[in-house]
Amino acid sequence: MTNWTAILPSNLLPDDANPEWLSKGDNAWQLTAATLVGLQSVPGLIILYGGAVKKKWAVNSAFMALYAFACVLVCWVCWGYRLSFGDQLVPIWGKINVAFTQQYLFERAFMGYLPNATMVYFQFVFAAITLILIAGAVLGRMNFYAWMLFVPLWLTFSYTIGAYTIWSLNGWLSSAGMIDYSGGYVIHLSSGVAGFTAAFWVGPRLTKDRERFPPNNILLMLAGAGLLWMGWTGFNGGDPYAASIDASLAIINTHVCTATSLLTWLLLDIIFFGKPSVIGAVQGMITGLVCITPAAGVVQGWAAIIMGLCSGSIPWFTMMVVHKKSELLQKVDDTMAVFHTHAVAGSLGGVLTGLFANPRLCYLFYGKYNRYVGLFYGIQMGAYRHGFRQIGLQLVGVAFVVGVNIVTTSLICIVVKLIVPLRMTEEDMEIGDQAAHGEDAYAIWGQGERNENSRFSTHNDMEMGSSKAKGHVERT
């Protein structure tokens, strides 16, 4: 047995709480990275959604995100994590089991010098944000009770399949050598396709809401967007499971690609529409973040810039040009344009990863030489077979994720529809938050006017003195 006392300072000596395999630095970074990703959802997407929708939908939109975050965590530790990263049941799914026993949580994780407890937490925040991104496609009309059922079902029967297949060491596409550095497929392509499919089944918003749906608070929306951008430091920087040089590369590539994408989208808005749009800039920011995600730690800086140019222009084109000419895209009401910002940008990033993946950087991440080779490097090295195989695997991954999510999301929506309506009533959609939750986003509006004595809820009404007349509550 190694005599650690003779070679290590006292603060690094192994003990019962710090086994020999544990890296305190890596573990600290992983917990930090996970928290940064969690902040992208709570409060990031909560306030982004709450600010980006009409005032009458601010509470409902924010609450859909908050509910999903809490629900996913409980499902994740009870069965979701082991389905995604546990022992193999089939090449696309793990065996169901819990992930909250002391013995299991203290064991070493499947990768990195970390305990399972840290890995369960880190992977949870990724699962949670995927469901919250799906919510963006159905804001402004989905029945909240239907959403309460949809979240655990989709996590169980769709997310876990993608995560196991692409990320688990024994998964089918993972074993084949497909590259998804941090979730371009598992999170963004999945949420984009699932959100679009769910929007199809739920149906559109009211006609007047589709025609005019102005943000109720653009500054609040920008605050949420800022948390989303900065939180991506943990999103991509945490995936080496170590505080390594590869983590540093992933972080700088992430921010460079995002800034390039935002500026590209902004310039296109100015050229074709004559005004620099704040909402457009946020869309360009998101597509840049999404596009670099499958590649962040395995491409060089110049590739990150090219990916930013592509993510700021191609999703812009699909959203501003193709969408207006496509009968299908016009028919499906995708409230936050999740299809363009996540499905299109995610698949774009996956394909570009197949072109730009650097063998040396892939070795730093995967620990294997000449297994992960981008097409351009394969041509340069004369390893044509490796390069074409990589781009082929990336395309197979796109087809697999799209197919799984269309089928599973459709089946889940059909099942939920048998239990509760997927869609709010027309009357409730006219009213919004008050009908859904009996609450308003802004209690004071206009010249200090308040919505008093709502017929939907008196939960927040405050009694004055001894005034307790039946059916009436005075407010301060």
Image: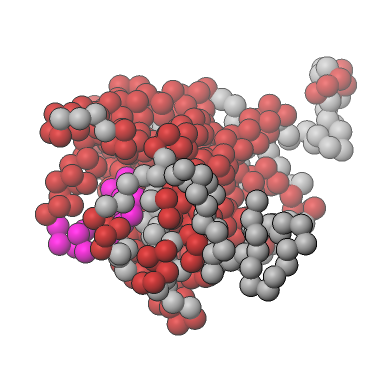
Quarter location, residue 332: bottom left
Q: As rendered, which of 394 and 342 lies closer to the eye?
A: 342
Q: As rendered, which of 164 and 35 lies closer to the eye?
A: 35
Whether residue 90 appears in this view of the structure is no
Q: How is the image coloured?
A: secondary structure
In the rendered image, the quadrant that contains the N terminus is: top right
Quarter location, residue 148: bottom right
Q: As rendered, which of 467 and 200 lies closer to the eye?
A: 467
> Magenta span covers which residues?
326-341
Residue lying at 11% horizontally and 54% vertically, measured from the top left: 325
- The image shows residue 235 at horizontal and vertical percentages of 50, 37
Vertical order, 296 against 204 (above or below): above
- The image shows residue 257 at horizontal and vertical percentages of 34, 28
- The image shows residue 361 at horizontal and vertical percentages of 42, 28
- The image shows residue 2 at horizontal and vertical percentages of 83, 27
Q: As rendered, which of 375 and 290 lies closer to the eye?
A: 290
In the image, 15: left or right of 312? right
Residue lying at 55% horizontally and 42% vertically, measured from the top left: 43
In the image, 34: left or right of 182? right
Residue lying at 44% horizontally and 23% vertically, measured from the top left: 252
Is 232 colored magenta in this rendering?
A: no
Residue, far bottom:
418
Vertical order, 117 against 423 (above or below): above
Vertical order, 67 against 310 (above or below): below
Whether residue 69 appears in this view of the structure is yes
Q: How many marks?
A: 0
In the image, 217: left or right of 244? left
In the image, 122: left or right of 236? right
Residue lying at 39% horizontally and 59% vertically, measured from the top left: 140
Quarter location, residue 293: top left
